Image: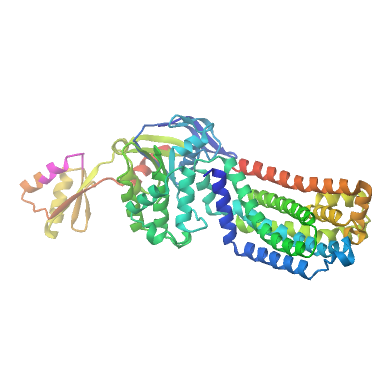
């Protein structure tokens, strides 16, 4: 068995033992199934827009749950072992620092993706049975994977910087609050109170991975003002649907690469 | 086996190791001794390649800086505090055995020989095990895989006296060809494991040699304790003080302690017998390493 496989198995086993990870995964699974089961997916009656609007619920569910499902195991993975002395023991084995860091990265990513596959496979199967094109489900899942990996990388970066598990998880939850919960509200308040420029708002949209995810996937589903919001609609109008999807995909990819690299540099320097 | 030239390490502005030169041969059993903050653990971390350092350091022919993985493959390591790993004991052992490239069965057999049965404890979570058990697990992992060097960083620091004695006993049957480096400030551990002492103080080596050489350097000798009938203790004390230097003969209950040169204890016992003094019991005591170290470090502070 390769070192990478060993780490992946270990991180998956650890995630499966983490109560909160299992609870969030279960809520995501049940909510996803309920949303697509009870939502208005009747394509024949309402046309394409019918399930796009119902799917918006699934998008928002993913925006809320996927980041926290990714952040919980990712923020803990390095900081917890550093705090307990396990990391030093691990690094004293015949492995390189890179194998440990990237092994953990891969392991947490696989654990999160496995939970998402279970949740999405169930919700997706119900949706397909109700007439939603499988390609749409796959596209949505592709964006969810990017969102999850972005938050895994952010969590790993936080974990590399923090000295203790509690600190890392707290920073992770603050990041989740800032990027997921308060982001839209903050933008709205800033816009109303200070009248910040539209360019700045667009920039913020592309800096925030959850906003990029929302605009990207909604553009694929149905680039409608009611779903995209005024800012998203303005972006789609300027860049076109293809450009918007490409740029949001690129934003999420950057969110995977940059925090991961920062985390790696910090991890190496922490020697 | 371990060669260090000009090894130095600085944390911020504090120099923790300073121009350390070392040469430890295969099969040697060496103790790194010193007060807290002397640089013992930092030296161990350098040996493991866990921290960047200045100077040259080679283990089993590998450059620690450039060939970290090969170096760590040559090292078995038991840390001061057994780290907590999530999962059942058998899972944790399987993970580290695979990581070290050794058979799970080999580690299990080693654990059994150390008195820890995986059949009994394999399904337990790591946190359910005692400190002594955990240290045995780490020792079993460190000993397998044909590693030529065993690094022990204060391995008994968090163990109770019984677990400590058991751990030290389990080090006894280790292969003679294995180099053992023990960092400790527990003198019983040092005396039980090592033949050569490297005394660190302020990041520098202030002594490197055998335990006997260290005693010689600070003028320490063995003490012969004789237990005599209570009524004979004081007169005998007077006689012995007249013969030996005043103040060197000490009394402890019904026993008298006499400083004797190596092997001279027998002569003293014969002399007492010929003088008609009935000795109820006798034993020898090596000088306390703590005292010896204090003496030595006193010179260097």
Residue B244 as seen in the image, left or right of residue A73: left
Quadrant of the rendered structure where residue B183 is?
Answer: top left
Query: Residue B28 versus residue A258: which sits nearer the camera?
Result: A258
Q: How is the image coloured?
A: rainbow
Q: Which residues are magenta?
A: B260-269
Query: Residue A31 versus residue A195: which sits nearer the camera?
Result: A31
Residue B200 as seen in the image, left or right of residue A247: left
Residue A140's place in the image compared with B183, above or below, is: below
Residue A10 as seen in the image, left or right of residue B162: right
Q: Position of residue B256 (x, y in %)?
A: 19, 52
Residue at image position (21%, 58%) is B253
Residue at image position (40%, 32%) is B1
Total tally of numbered discs in the picture: 0
Query: Residue B281 versus residue A144: which sits nearer the camera?
Result: A144
Query: Residue A61 versus residue B180: which sits nearer the camera?
Result: A61
Q: Is residue B301 visible?
A: no
Query: Is B156 part of what is drawn in magenta?
Result: no
Q: Position of residue A198 (x, y in %)?
A: 93, 51
Q: Position of residue B148 (x, y in %)?
A: 39, 37
Residue B249 as seen in the image, left or right of residue B158: left
Residue at image position (91%, 55%) is A231
Query: In the orientation shown, which residue stands out farthest toward the bottom?
Result: A38
**The C terminus of chain A sits in image quarter:** top right
Q: Is residue B118 visible?
A: yes
């Amino acid at each position: 068995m390769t070192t990478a496989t060993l780490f992946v198995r270990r991180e998956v086993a650890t995630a499966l033992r983490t109560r909160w990870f299992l609870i969030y995964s279960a809520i995501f699974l049940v909510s996803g199934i309920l949303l697509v089961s009870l939502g208005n997916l009747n394509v024949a009656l309402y046309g394409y827009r019918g399930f796009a609007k119902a799917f918006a619920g699934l998008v928002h569910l993913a925006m809320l749950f996927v980041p926290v499902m990714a952040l919980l195991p990712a923020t803990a993975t390095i900081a917890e072992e550093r705090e307990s002395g396990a990391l030093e023991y691990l690094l004293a084995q015949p492995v390189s620092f890179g194998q440990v860091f990237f092994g953990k990265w891969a392991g947490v990513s696989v654990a999160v993706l496995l939970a998402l596959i279970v949740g999405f496979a169930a919700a997706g199967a119900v949706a397909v049975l109700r007439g939603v094109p499988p390609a749409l489900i796959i596209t949505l899942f592709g964006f969810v994977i990017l969102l999850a990996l972005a938050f895994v990388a952010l969590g790993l970066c936080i974990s590399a910087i923090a000295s203790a598990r509690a600190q890392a998880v707290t920073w992770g939850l603050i990041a989740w609050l800032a990027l997921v919960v308060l982001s839209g509200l903050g933008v709205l308040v800033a816009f109303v109170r200070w009248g910040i420029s539209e360019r700045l708002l667009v920039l913020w949209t592309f800096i925030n991975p959850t906003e990029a995810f929302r605009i990207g996937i909604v553009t694929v589903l149905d680039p409608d003002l009611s779903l995209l919001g005024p800012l998203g609609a303005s972006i789609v109008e300027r860049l076109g649907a293809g450009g918007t999807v490409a740029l949001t995909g690129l934003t999420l990819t950057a969110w995977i690469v940059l925090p991961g690299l920062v985390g790696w540099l910090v991890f190496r320097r922490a020697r | 086996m371990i060669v260090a030239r000009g090894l130095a390490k600085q944390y911020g502005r504090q120099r923790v190791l300073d121009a350390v030169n070392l040469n430890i041969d295969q099969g040697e059993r060496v103790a790194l001794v010193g007060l807290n903050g002397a640089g013992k653990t930092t030296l161990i971390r350098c040996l493991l390649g866990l921290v960047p350092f200045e100077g040259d350091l080679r283990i089993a022919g590998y450059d620690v800086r450039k060939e970290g993985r090969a170096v760590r493959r040559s090292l078995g390591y038991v840390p001061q505090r057994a780290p907590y790993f999530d999962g059942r004991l058998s899972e944790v052992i399987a993970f580290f055995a695979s990581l070290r490239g050794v058979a799970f069965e080999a580690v299990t057999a080693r654990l059994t020989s150390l008195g820890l049965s995986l059949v009994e404890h394999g399904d337990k979570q790591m946190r359910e095990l005692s400190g002594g058990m955990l240290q045995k697990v780490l020792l079993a992992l460190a000993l397998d895989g044909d590693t030529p060097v065993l690094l022990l960083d204060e391995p008994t620091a968090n163990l109770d006296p019984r677990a400590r004695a058991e751990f030290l006993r389990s080090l006894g049957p280790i292969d003679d060809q294995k180099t053992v480096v023990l960092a400790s400030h527990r003198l019983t551990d040092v005396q039980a494991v090592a033949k050569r002492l490297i005394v660190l103080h302020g990041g520098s080596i202030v002594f490197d040699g055998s335990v006997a050489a260290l005693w010689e350097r600070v003028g320490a000798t063995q003490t012969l304790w004789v237990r005599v009938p209570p009524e004979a203790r004081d007169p005998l004390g007077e006689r012995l003080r007249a013969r030996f230097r005043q103040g060197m003969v000490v009394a402890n209950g019904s026993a008298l302690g006499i400083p004797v040169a190596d092997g001279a204890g027998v002569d003293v016992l014969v002399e007492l017998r010929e003088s008609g003094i009935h000795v109820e019991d006798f034993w020898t005591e090596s000088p306390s390493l703590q005292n010896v170290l204090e003496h030595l470090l006193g010179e260097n502070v």
